[in-house]
Amino acid sequence: MANFGKNTRQTIIAALLCGALAPAASAADLREHLSVIDPVIKLGDLFDGLGAEAETIILEAPAPGDSKQLSSHELDRIAEQYSLDWQRPTYLKRVNVYREGNAFSLDDLGDIALREAQAAGIAGNIDIQVFGRRAGLYLPADTSVEDIQLENFQLNNRQDRFTAVALIPTGTNQPSRLNISGRVQEVRMVPTLARVLAPGEVISKSDIQWTRLPVRQINNRVVASSAELVGQTVKRSLQPGRPLYTTDVMAPVVVEKGSVVTMVVQLGGLSLTASGRALENGGQGDTIRVMNTKSKQTVDAKVLNPAQVAVTSNSLTLAAL
């Protein structure tokens, strides 16, 4: 009995020692939302309730804005490797780990390219257009477009095109490299409509906004000052923000097509009048065609007011009155 008691005590002690030396499995639950910010996946990004072990790096994270798929077998392997007390649900086949990021477009690189162009000696009011419409571009969640740098910025001989390499932060020491190109152009502010106006509606100062327009698109037909617009009317509905041409606007209609007016003819100190019918709309100071209601002759006349026009045709036409 004494030997039996001694042996039993030794067995219990040995068992206790083995239990003390053996690593205890940590109770863990799979996280409900699997997303990361860093370029690596840590144990705590997958499982809850791990304490200090949560900071253990286990995998490389996907690129910002992308996701990595982990199968149920990989999860089992990870749980076993790190002695996690986790029971995989039978329905679980795979999970996706998403890396958060900030989306950006090639257009967002315009300001960066503008600074490079100015540093290269391009002066004046210039605008940069980056070519392409590439989708799916992301930065790490803790960075912004301002963290992107350009290298090998080069202008062509005419200094209206550029090429460069954009260094996109990845969260590691190695940025990704993206070749870009674009246009450099001088721009000027021109007045445009801020809203859609109905034909005949008078343009007020509040209806005008200023828009940047490439100088190469500006000619003598483009309205360049707000003074040319205020008090005028549009001939047809025009889209806001688009450049306006002198043919798009006119003075408010004073004489309407079909209305009866008095035609005034000034011959030296002699003034003659006749009744006429306007054949087209006319604003103050516009020259329109008017038909003499008696002789049916058509003459050109300048609009004086809603009731009078001054005949501007030659002497032979005047004789027909």
Image: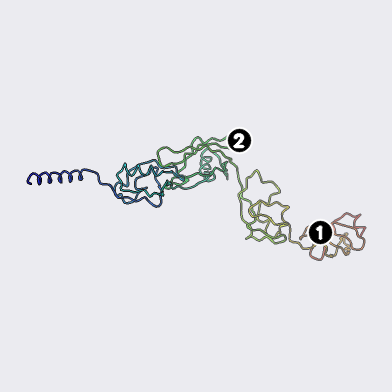
Question: What is the x, y in percent for residue 247?
Answer: 73, 52
Q: Amino acid at mark 1?
A: Glu
Q: Camera-side residue: 212 or 121?
A: 212
Q: Residues within 10 Å of mark 2 (few under 14, many from 20)?
A: few
Give the side of residue 128 with respect to residue 193, left or right.
left
User: Residue placed at 23% from the left, 43% from the top?
Assistant: 22
Q: Camera-side residue: 303 or 259?
A: 259
Q: Is residue 281 above or below residue 94?
A: below
Q: Which residue is mark 2?
A: 158
To which quarter of the image does residue 128 belong? top right
Q: Amino acid at mark 2?
A: Arg
Question: What is the x, y in percent for residue 286?
Answer: 78, 57
Give the side of residue 155 with respect to residue 315, left or right.
left
Give the side of residue 125 with respect to residue 149, left or right.
right
Q: Earlier in the sequence, mark 1 or mark 2?
A: 2
Disc assigned to residue 280: 1
- Cα distance in 3D space between marks 1 and 2: 49 Å
User: Residue placed at 50% from the left, 37% from the top?
Assistant: 165
Q: How is the image coloured?
A: rainbow
Could you tell me which secondary element the residue under label 2 belongs to? loop
